[in-house]
């Protein structure tokens, strides 16, 4: 299972940008980088995913290092509703597509 | 469109009893996954269905757990007999069937909180 490493927790002020880092030094060429988040008492929720190029969607941006050994999830303006545990996950469509969750980063948004 | 639905949302049973959890995936999603989080631990993969077939059940902890997906629609996860260490939150997820070159998002249900006393 490809492993990811994330800080246990981070804090951000409301309406400021947040950069959530993830290291995945053992990533293989066919692993996609996925980010999910889990709000309290809910199931994990898709945020964004990418393979090599940076990605943007309505929720966030994903910046992927050139060597793909790390990535950063960017929330452009944190809101109180963004307080959640964020999981960086490597997912390989050639080996079953299941997720291997780590401990994730618990994001606290300060009003 | 309805999301992934899990039932019940909570279940409290005594050690030795049987519990059956149900998951209704999003219509048209061939892939169905079961995950669980036991207290204080990470979310762990249990098994993966493609339609009615078990693609990967390497995460099933022991033979007290039985998952089925008859007809390739909803799935059930039965725990018989339940033990104290089975307590946790059980999540179901579904996704579209993809080719090797694609990788799509998975949609998770709200989970079933199982407490074995």
Image (cartoon, coloured by chain):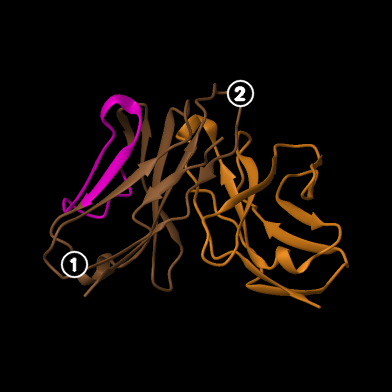
Chain colours: A orange, B brown
Given residues B37 and B12, the one toward you in this image is: B12
Q: Which residue is mark 1?
A: B83
Q: Chain of mark 1?
A: B
Mark in front: 1 vs 2: 1
Left or right placement of residue A33 versus residue B55 in this view: right
Question: Reading the chain from its start, which is encountered first: label 1 or label 2?
Answer: 1
CA gap between label 1 and label 2 equals 41 Å
* Left or right placement of residue A98 versus residue A91 in this view: left
| Viewer-side residue, A40 vs A86 | A40
Q: Which residues are magenta?
A: B58-78
What residue is at 47 percent from the left and 25 percent from the top?
Answer: B28
Quadrant of the snapshot with the N terminus of chain B: top right
Residue situated in front as seen by the camera: B116 or B100: B116
Residue A15 found in image quarter? bottom right
- Whether residue A103 can be seen here: yes
Magenta-span inclusion, residue B115: no
Residue under the point 80% across and 56% down: A74
Q: Residue furthest bottom?
A: A110
| Label 2 SS | loop
Where on the picture, by quarter, is residue B5?
A: top left
For label 2, the residue is B101
């Amino acid at each position: 299972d490809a492993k990811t490493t994330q800080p246990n927790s981070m804090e951000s002020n409301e309406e400021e940008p947040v950069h959530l880092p993830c290291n995945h030094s053992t990533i293989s060429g066919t692993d996609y980088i996925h980010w999910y988040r889990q709000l309290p008492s809910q199931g994990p929720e898709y945020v964004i995913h990418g393979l090599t190029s940076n990605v943007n969607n309505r929720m966030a941006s994903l910046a992927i290092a050139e060597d793909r050994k790390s990535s950063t999830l960017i929330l452009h303006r944190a809101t109180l509703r963004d307080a959640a545990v964020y999981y960086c996950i490597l997912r390989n469509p050639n080996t079953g597509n299941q997720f291997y969750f780590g401990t994730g980063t618990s994001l606290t948004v300060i009003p | 469109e309805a999301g992934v639905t899990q039932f019940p949302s909570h279940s409290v049973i005594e050690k030795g009893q049987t519990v059956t959890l149900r998951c209704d995936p999003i219509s048209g999603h061939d892939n169905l996954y079961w995950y669980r989080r036991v207290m204080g631990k990470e979310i762990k993969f249990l098994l993966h269905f493609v339609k009615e077939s078990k693609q990967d059940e390497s995460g099933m902890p022991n033979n007290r757990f039985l998952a089925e997906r008859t007809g390739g629609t909803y799935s059930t996860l039965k725990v018989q007999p339940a033990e104290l260490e089975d307590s946790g939150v059980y999540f179901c997820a579904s996704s579209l069937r993809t080719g090797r070159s694609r990788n799509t998002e998975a949609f998770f249900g709200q989970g079933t909180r199982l407490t074995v006393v």
